[in-house]
Amino acid sequence: MRRLITFFLFIFPILAYCQAMPTYKNWDKHDVIKIYQKQELPADTIDEEGEDITAVYTSSKLRDGIYEIELYKISSKFYQIRGSNTYILFRYTPYLYSYDDGILEISYNSGTFYKKP
């Protein structure tokens, strides 16, 4: 009986720890290297070649944390966080669709996007 109690006292904390681990850590992950904000420009703004431009993307910061987000594809490595003026740049071209849900984990203005299966 004593061995059984010792066994459960040893196993229970391990099982509790495994269940408390976030499940999203097992999803496909993609490195985020930079965060940007879109800045709208006044009408009739041009670039160095005389072409009209309406916006620029400036480096920005996001608070460290874990966010549940939906991404919208702008280009191969550049995505917008849907419903916001925030954009993220991936290190490599991620295997994502035009819209994808997932978890964004930010630390020191870079992080990881975990794609929801």
Image (tube, rainbow, N blue to C red):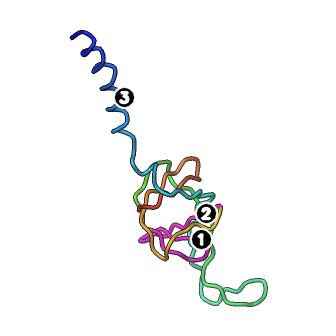
List x then y, in percent, for residue 55.
Answer: 60, 79
Q: Name the residue that disc number 3 marks.
A: 14
* Amino acid type shown at disc 1: Phe
Decide: few, some or many residues near mark 3? Use Cα within 10 Å; few <14, some 14-19, many ≥20: few
Q: Name the residue that disc number 1 marks.
A: 78
Mark 2 in CB contact with mark 1 (< 8 angstroms) = yes
List x then y, in percent, for residue 24.
Answer: 42, 51
Say which residue appears at 35% left-offset and 38% top-offset: 20
List x then y, in percent, for residue 73.
Answer: 53, 75
Say which residue appears at 54% left-offset and 54% top-offset: 112
* Amino acid type shown at disc 3: Ile
Label whose residue precedes the other's in the sequence (2 or 1)? 1
Name the residue furthest left. Answer: 1
Magenta span covers which residues? Answer: 71-91
Label whose residue precedes the other's in the sequence (3 or 2)? 3
Decide: few, some or many residues near mark 1? Use Cα within 10 Å; few <14, some 14-19, many ≥20: many
Considering depth in this image, is 32 or 19 the residue closer to the camera? 19
Numbered badge on residue 18? none
* Secondary structure category for the residue under label 3: helix
| 72 up-or-down from 43: above or below | above
Name the residue furthest right. Answer: 49
Numbered badge on residue 90? 2
